[in-house]
Image (spheres, coloured by chain):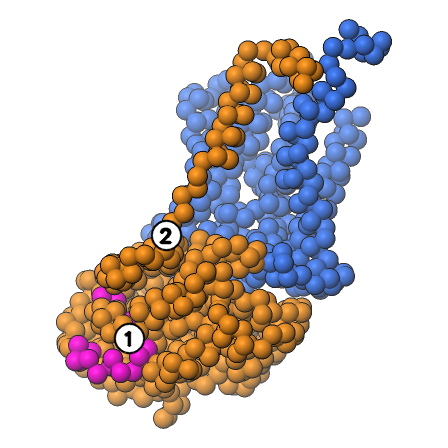
Chain colours: A orange, B blue
Amino acid sequence: MTTLIQVCKNLSLGTRVLLALAVFSSIGIVLWPASKQEGMDLWMFTRLHERLYIPLIAEWNTEHAKSPVHISLLSVPALERRLLSAFLSGTPAADLAEIIRETAAKTFSGPLDDIGFVDLTDRIHDEGIDKQIVEASFSPWTSRGRIFGLPHDVHPVALAYRADIIEAAGIDITKARTWSEFFHLLAPLMADTNRDGIPDRFILNYGIGNVDVTEALILQAGGSFFDPDDHPVIYTPLNARVISELVSWTEGPARAAVDAPEFSASGNKLKLDGFVLCSIMPDWLSGVWKNDLRGLSGKIKLMPLPAWDEGGLRTSVIGGTMIGVPKAAPNFEASWAVAKYLYLSPDNAARLFQEAGIITPIRAFWKNPMYDKPDPFFCGQPIGRTYINLCDRLPRRSASPFNFLAKQRMTDAMLTLRQYARETGDYSLAHLEPKASELLAQAQASVERQIKKNVFLREPATKPQKEESQTR
Amino acid sequence: MSLETGSTSHPRWAPYVFLAPFLILFGVFTIYPLIQAVILAFQQTYGPNTTRFIGLDNFRYLFSDPLFWKALRNTAVYSCASVFIQLPFSLALALWLNHPKVKGRAIFRLIFFSPSLFGIVFVAMLFSLIFEKYTGLLNVGLHNLFGFSLEFPWLEEYTLTALILASLWMSIGFNMIYFLAALQGVSVELLEAARIDGANAWHRFFHVTLPQIQPVAAFVVLLSLIGSFQLFELPWILLGGGGPDNKGLTIVMYLYQTGFETGDLGYASAIGWILALILITMAVCQRTISKRFES
């Protein structure tokens, strides 16, 4: 002690002051009582959903004053980082989390027992929720046969077209039943009147880089990246045919598509200018257009997607959101009750459509007459009913953590295929399909190699999942 | 009160107390993560609690991983462009702006240096608009001036060129400042003597100026190489990831994607160690070459 005092005596006044400040502030921090927030935390990523939930949550909180719900709005990357960090390190997370498909897939890359969300499979079956909701809506939240989230939406896809331009040209586009008929009918509108080498307008908004639309079109054709057991099925004759056609849409003598990206000023300008006539439009995008492209009000109409073959599927699916309960949530029953309150609420379903154009996945609510109301933005079409009519035929999607990788490899294959077509100068399907098959075989091998590297996916669950979910 | 006699007013443990804060922080935030990264490189992980020892599998996979080689190739091309395009431009600018006859040198220096004051994210956002097809400043400008195609796919197919151009705009002025500082230390007497002896401008540059700025040039080259191998933010924002067909994928970006998007911290650690080895090798080579030049 005396030596310590002696050391302190040798210190300058400034050092002593700094030392005293450090000691007192450290003691202060240790003794300061940490404020603990009562109730439950709900993490979400979109302001739109937040706006819809605020009145519902306020109502819930008045009835459950002891355990109120607090909404935290985070950006998608921030939510993903926090959630994955919490899951991977076992630290506390929110009581409920609303996430997109890509985030959910990332949480499914470990052993089944270690997935950070509570397995809801038995709850959903026991409470009959699976019978109320469109079956395809569960697929992005299902890993190895177990469901980890309650679906928020269905997201059927239709085709939006510039009725003002197309109908003024005397073309009845609704007659197009297949993609080839569609491009054939609209071909006259692709003239190059100013002779600058670029058509005055393009028929379809599509670029090879748009992986979500590529996936939707492959799903529409009946193709897929993974089978129901999550084994990669990228290398198939059907996928080869689809990507060959998609490449020929974007370049070569039959070129009809241009990339006018969503959520970008340049993409929006191309749409407003009529440079692109048709866009592949999931229900949520109709709400986005109403906000971002008001200049198109009364100029747009919706129709089912043209099929790949006569009598084929006239829709597909893009996007998706779920709500899940992290295992670290202290009171599962309370979190589950809030999840059902938000996702199975008829009021929320109605507001979801009115404010965002999103169709609820709960079939019973589709009877609501608001879905038949004419929409002035879409030239008076009842777009709610148009989308609902497509909901029952939606393709199943994979929740594989490697789905994103598969989409990337597919895009790489398409870019190489386009380069091949460019070099050979031949964009015919007969010429492209064999090369497409070869490239898809390479893409599949690459994905398989990555999957094989993950030892966890090969391990079976150690605990019976039913037992685990019932103990919660 | 001398060290030789061993008599001191401080106790023997006093130096350790003073060293302790640094050692603790260094141990916790540098040594421990380094050791952990070595261990991780031999594991498959799903967070720190779920790990499996997989031996050399991560390294085996790495050396046969086409994406890793693509990332390495892209990074190497970008680094070469930094050294062989960007630095000569910076040096040329510095030589010009060091010339006493150039009017308004201070203003020009500020103009050329100012892009490096912007954040990388801002620069990436700016160039993503400039390189847009149909509506981007570059394509529209070139189209109006020379009839250049509005569809020129800068970000789709000329990804590395676009990256190098953006980086050139941002970094050229920053490196110019280093060269300017070095040029101001070049002996005027020597240059004058060479001129009197009949040496032309090229001879004076190669035989007088360059040897004198060589230490600074070597430092700038090393800094530029290390910076290039750590390239991440610019392509990440400009291309929204690795870009089409991963044409803009860099090693650090691949490390980030593997560790924080795929969640494979073990493989990311293996990539990190290979990157560290590359950087160490480059630094050693650069030092060796510099010493040879000096001698």
Give neighbour class at mark 2: few <14, some 14-19, many 20+ (Cα, 10 Å): few
Q: Which residues are magenta?
A: A355-372
Residue A299 image position (x, y, % from top left)? 18, 71
Q: Residue furthest bottom?
A: A311
User: Would residue A336 be found to the left or right of residue A368 on screen?
Assistant: right
Residue A348 image position (x, y, % from top left)? 25, 69
Instruction: Identify the disc placed on residue A38.
Output: 2
Report the residue at 41% width, 51% height from top. Answer: B128
User: Are discs 1 and 2 both within one chain?
Assistant: yes
Dot 2: chain letter: A
Would you say residue A470 is visible in this rendering? yes
Name above or below for residue A93 compared with residue A470.
above
Report the residue at 42% width, 82% height from top. Answer: A126
Examine the image and state in which quarter residue A185 appears. bottom left
User: Would residue A283 be found to the left or right of residue B205 on screen?
Assistant: left
Examine the image and state in which quarter residue A324 appears. bottom left
Instruction: Identify the disc placed on residue A359.
Output: 1
Residue A244 image position (x, y, % from top left)? 49, 79
Between A207 and A213, the one lying in front of the other is: A213
Can residue A413 be found in the magenta stretch?
Answer: no
User: Would residue A467 be found to the left or right of residue B208 on screen?
Assistant: left
Check disc 2 and give the amino acid type: Glu
> Whole-Å distance between the Cαs marked 1 and 2?
34 Å
User: Would residue A317 be found to the left or right of residue B285 on screen?
Assistant: left
| Local secondary structure at mark 2 | loop
